[in-house]
Amino acid sequence: MSGKSAKDFFRPLAVGAPQPLREIPARPSRAIHFFDPSNAKMAAKVPAMVGTVDVLLGNLEDAVKAENKEAARQGLVDIAKGTDFGPTQLWTRINALDSPWVLDDLTTLVTEIGDRLDVIMVPKVQGAEDIHYVDRLLAQLEAKAGLERPLLVHAILETARGVANVEEICGASPRMQGLSLGPADLAADRRMKTTRVGGGHPGYLVREDPPRVDGVANLEARRSTYQQDLWHYTIARMVDACAMHGIYPYYGPFGDIADVVACEDQFRNAFLLGCVGTWSLHPQQIAIAHRVFSPSAEDVAHARRVVAAMGDGTGAVMLDGKMEDDASLKQCLVMVELAEQLAA
Ligand code: GLV
Ligand code: MG
């Protein structure tokens, strides 16, 4: 081997792309577990969750009632000051940039707990201008608070305009850490005819062609249907834009908490397409996310065999009847690198 890692192949910055302010931390963030800091019962459970999940996120936006916005902000400050988060990252989701709360969210959080927060998730991002605004404001607040470590920014892709501008959003600031899909707001903004938070829809399907007898279609015959993934297009666009800018793509919320099977399927599709993690809205989704967004022992063992068999990384070898070459080696290095990151 040439000593290269998957990173050398997978995340080169495009020519002309902004240079990172600092290396985006390659810390595992398979599950971003949301909690409402204004909900005393939920907030009391946070310290005990440290170490059980990659990321804990204090949510200030949707799902927090308007009358509780101040309490949520203050609750997050109290939790952050009173808890040692150890290996678990602390993120927040601020209110939307056109809301009456966001200025106080940013001012209070950066001033009071800017040294404890890792990532600020910004909802309903429409274009680079939104990220520029947050970036400038953070720079001013960080300078005032004397923070030495810049806060990172994560955008939610949940408007049609945001999807159209996804590449410029990813490259809008060296602070950009990643992007999540926001299927509920995005569905509404696109005027999709769904009422769920993420996941599929039984009506979005393709039907098998009819059998033909002597060239004549039998439209009466029973035919299978296959449900399609409503989110494939957006996730694929998001993954490409993130890879181009060297930042991380995530699935988002899966609202049907009881349907753990469909949740796992949706998460796995996102993992296979390139996402590094997802949101968790209920503790039982944490285990699903950690499992799905970690490569299986079998895949890692196979990847290591290919790496070993490929020697200096060039040429082609046959392994178990399959051709492996420079390109399959790169895929295997992605898997090995992720396994090593998670084991570290
Ligand atoms: C998340 O914020 C969503 O709108 O799905
Ligand atoms: Mg939303």
Image: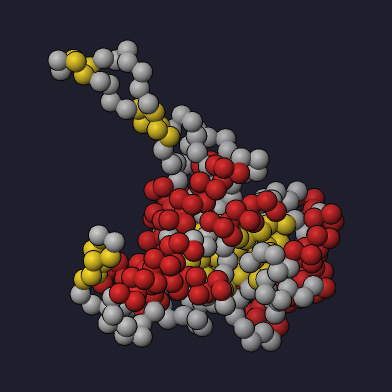
Find residue 141 and report its image quarter: bottom right
Find residue 46 and report its image quarter: bottom right
Q: Position of residue 308 (x, y in %)?
A: 34, 76
119 and 47: which is toward the camera: 47
Q: Position of residue 195 (x, y in %)?
A: 57, 35
Q: How is the image coloured?
A: secondary structure
Query: What quarter of the picture does the N terminus occupy?
Result: bottom left
Q: Is residue 235 visible?
A: yes
Give the number of callouts. Answer: 0
Instruction: Identify whether 264 is placed above or below 322.
Output: above
165 and 204: which is toward the camera: 204
Q: Is residue 86 left or right of residue 98?
A: right
Query: What quarter of the picture does the C terminus occupy?
Result: bottom right
Residue at the spot 39% in from the left edge and 48% down from the top edge: 233
Residue at the spot 50% in from the left edge and 81% down from the top edge: 23
Instruction: Identify whether 213 is placed above or below 26.
Output: above
